[in-house]
Amino acid sequence: MGVDLLNRSSYEFLSSSKSFECTLGKRKYFSFSSFQQQPPKKERRLFGPTLEDGFWDIISSSAKQPNLEVIRSCNGKVMLSNLSFMPSAKPRVYKTIGLKEGEGTYGLVFTVIDIDNPEKELVMKISVANSNFFAEVSALNFLNSKKTTPNVPQLHDWFITDKLPPNSGHWGKISDSLKKSSQFKNISKYPVGYLILEKANAGALASFTKNHCSGYQKDIWKLVDSILFQLLFTASALPESSVIHRDIGGYNIMLTSTDDIKENYLNFRVGKQLFRFEKQPIKPLLIDYGTANILEIGSSLKTDFRYTTLRYRAPEMIFLSSKPTGTLQPIFTPATDLFSIAMSVIEMVLGDFTEHKDGKKYYNHPFMSHNPPPLLHFKLKQLSKQLQIDENNFKIDCATRMWYGTLHSGFLTVDESLLLSRYIWGMYMELGIPNNRMWPGVEDTHVWSIMNEVIQNQKRLNLVYPTEGGLLLRGNGKLRQLLSEDQISCLLSMLRFNPKHRPSPAAILKSEIFDEYSISPSEVSTLSSAFWSVSGTPLQATQQF
């Protein structure tokens, strides 16, 4: 189905169509030149693993690197008793000054260097070696091997062991931090996972305006265009590499310098269409793949958990059918990631979504800056509690009870009900009121029914309520300082309620938005041999619901 990306009327849906985030990149500046020259390689093994100056020889800690295919066949379940049967990791010695970079749901992150490659800026993410750890390793391994996008961090190394880092020197500080973290309370049962990645050194996308637009910069719009293009390009590259991220947000997209890129231009191919961008000082890196879905033939896109941080969550992870056989099931597709990318781009321009300013909560968030009626929070909280009660009501059939359990534990939780009320109310205010014509089945969801009740109550009381068409971000002038009207229209197309009505990333890339960066096939001879390519074919065939 063809969809006009730029036509304002295309916001309407076609009737015939079917908290915690990882802060892996909250970077602080760290100079690797401050390290003293390392001992010669042949002498390195003479040093113990717990020296005061911060060396750690991982082989001395019985580091293992098992076969990923075998681990995935076991659903990422590894016990301590399995370690003795696994192959050893490659010999490495890492050094640290104990600088903590961040802490997220799936690990703590510290700055390190590999003494064989001291010029590389690296971080070590340490977590329990569970299915999330192996999902991240597998996803990065897939994406690094495919080499279809420049916007994925390079996986330098990974290993598992039954030991925390050495308990002395700077490593001792790290070990103490891990012991105090609630994530490691079951460390006696499972191995510890270590993931070593390239370090992003220019902050999070959420802090883009603060870090990179504080003063006037000539041609800043070129940098914005480049970042927007690369994020959309990566949204196309991930599913082509059999990966759905499932937790995209402003702090899971980092910015890093392009000093390692020697060419003056970045070249891309989308299908048969070629694009060339002048190299900018920074580029985006999409990080944190702990919840990624690695797709294989026959793999399912259905999920029992929402994954994405609420500030970036797509409607299909909120509006779910009230019955287990209903139309709207929790299917997490590449279009779900695309919604999160659109929200992240808006955060890049407006500023950190979590900021409060002038007494206004979530000042920069286009949805959560709207104040919802207290009644909405009350009803959402009441819904979650009732679902929990009904899950244990044996007068209800088993399938329905299981469905209610999935809803209240994975998507409509009591703890999140207050923020969810802000998010949904603002979503309606900006994007309009969904209906069965634009999104079949939406009116048969608990959330839609509650919103309908609250809106009718607002009308009776002559209070503010959303309109069918929505504000469509028209009241936000700050967006237009860095984005054109066509780009805003593009973002709105990515934010459509019905995921089937969102355009594919390739369709956006090949639209007139990026015409000025398109080059003809006759110029292909001038292209560098190093460029990135995607076919632009949407994900198909593996969707077993």
Image: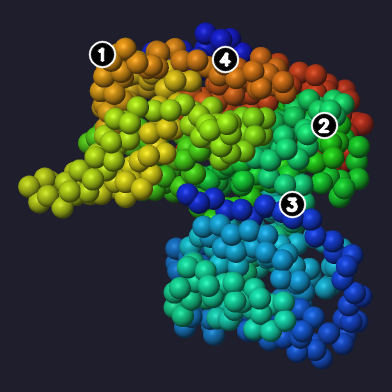
Decide if residue 481 is on the left or right side of residue 523.
left
Image: 96 above or below 135:
below
**Amino acid tagged 4:** Arg
**Cα gap from disc 2 to disc 1, whole angstroms:** 48 Å
Residue 401, x across and y down, in percent: 19, 47
**Element carrying mark 2:** loop
Q: Nearer the viewer, mark 3 or mark 2?
A: 2
In the picture, the quarter occupied by the C terminus is top left
**Element carrying mark 3:** loop
Return the residue at label 3: 200
**Element carrying mark 1:** helix
**Cα gap from disc 4 to disc 1, whole angstroms:** 27 Å
Q: Mark 4 or mark 1: which comes first in sequence?
A: 1
- Measuring 28% from the left and 36% from the top, which residue is drawn there? 378
Residue 190, x across and y down, in percent: 47, 75
Q: Residues within 10 Å of mark 3 (few under 14, many from 20)?
A: many
Q: Residue furthest front?
A: 359
